Amino acid sequence: MIITAEHRLLAQEGHLASASLLSGFEALAKIDYDRAGTIYSTLFALSIGMERIMKIAVILNHKAANDLANPTDKQLKALGHSITELYEHVRLIGAAHGLADGWFEARSHHYDALEALSEFALGSRYYNFDQLTNGKQHPDPLVRWFKVHIQIAEHVLSHRRLERIMGRARAFCEARGALGWEWGPLGRWELTIDVNYQICAAHATRGQCVWAIIEILKPVCQLIEILTDKVQALEVEKGSESATPYMIEFFPFRWTPREAAIRRKAWSSLFHLGGR
């Protein structure tokens, strides 16, 4: 099969989106809240990957609805970098194609993760410069993401497990006489025992955070599969050269079982089509 320029460009975009997401999963699975660089790496990779995978769905939908024509540069740029707005846009596309299940509503911890990544993509990634220059005011991305993580931790861990973590945190601090106050990852002064508890609870649930992101992406991946089938069928009907790869193959993490996703630490080298 002769690969067209458009086919190659879409494939490269698939590689880029997949590689960004897999790097984000790996960074999140190993995130260390005592090392700020690991948090920034996670947020950069996930926000880029999220935006790109959803824009792939938008492009495929435009091709399916407009006789294989791609959206214009102006149309694509009009979508901006807001991940939450892109998510709602893609959700509407999904509904138009009979895909109504699997999306998350506001006030869920999944949607809160989307909002935190969207804030980072729109401006929080410049937080340090903005603070130094008295520029635009954005939430501290380190604090914002930790709030998301601790919310997920307290949702997925049983009360008994959380009590055990608190017990270990208390014993650790008492043994070292660390019974004072310190600036915690939630951006406020807290007892050292509470800070230790929060860090331990987050450490125990890094894999659950990866799974939460995969859950957010599942309907997006399903939509990409539906739209790819429609576009490829239209290409056959029109007798056109194949210009659309089977895009879902770039996102095989969609089929990762929950327990495997929670345990896995290495993601970026896992899938050949993910850009290895």
Image (cartoon, rainbow, N blue to C red):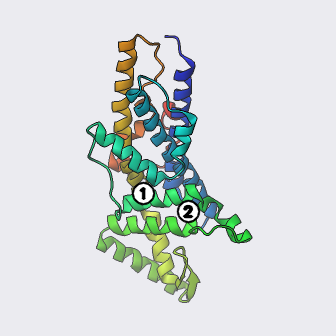
Counting from the top left corner in percent of width and height, residue 83 is at 48, 52
For label 2, the SS is: loop
Quarter that holds the C terminus: top right
Q: Residue placed farthest to the right in the image? A: 133
Which amino acid lies under the numbered mark 2 shown in the image of this protein? Asp
Q: Residue 235 vs residue 192: left or right?
A: left
Comparing 8 with 142, the one in front is 8
Q: Position of residue 215 (x, y in %)?
A: 36, 49
Q: Label 1: few (<14), some or many (≥20) within 10 Å?
A: many
Label 1: state its secondary structure: helix
Marked residue nearer the N-terminal end (1 or 2) = 2
Distance (Cα) linking label 1 and label 2: 13 Å
Residue 140 drawn at (x, y percent): 58, 69
| Residue 209 marker | 1
Q: How many labels does the image show?
A: 2
Task: Identify the residue at horizontal 68%, vertical 67% (top origin).
Answer: 130
Q: Which numbered tag is attached to residue 32?
A: 2
The image quarter in which residue 161 lies = bottom left
Q: In this view, does 47 lie above or below 160?
A: above
Residue found at x 38% / y 21% = 232
Where residue 57 sits, quadrant-wise, is top left
* Observer-nearest of 86 and 254: 86
Q: Which residue is drawn at 43% across and 64% down?
A: 204
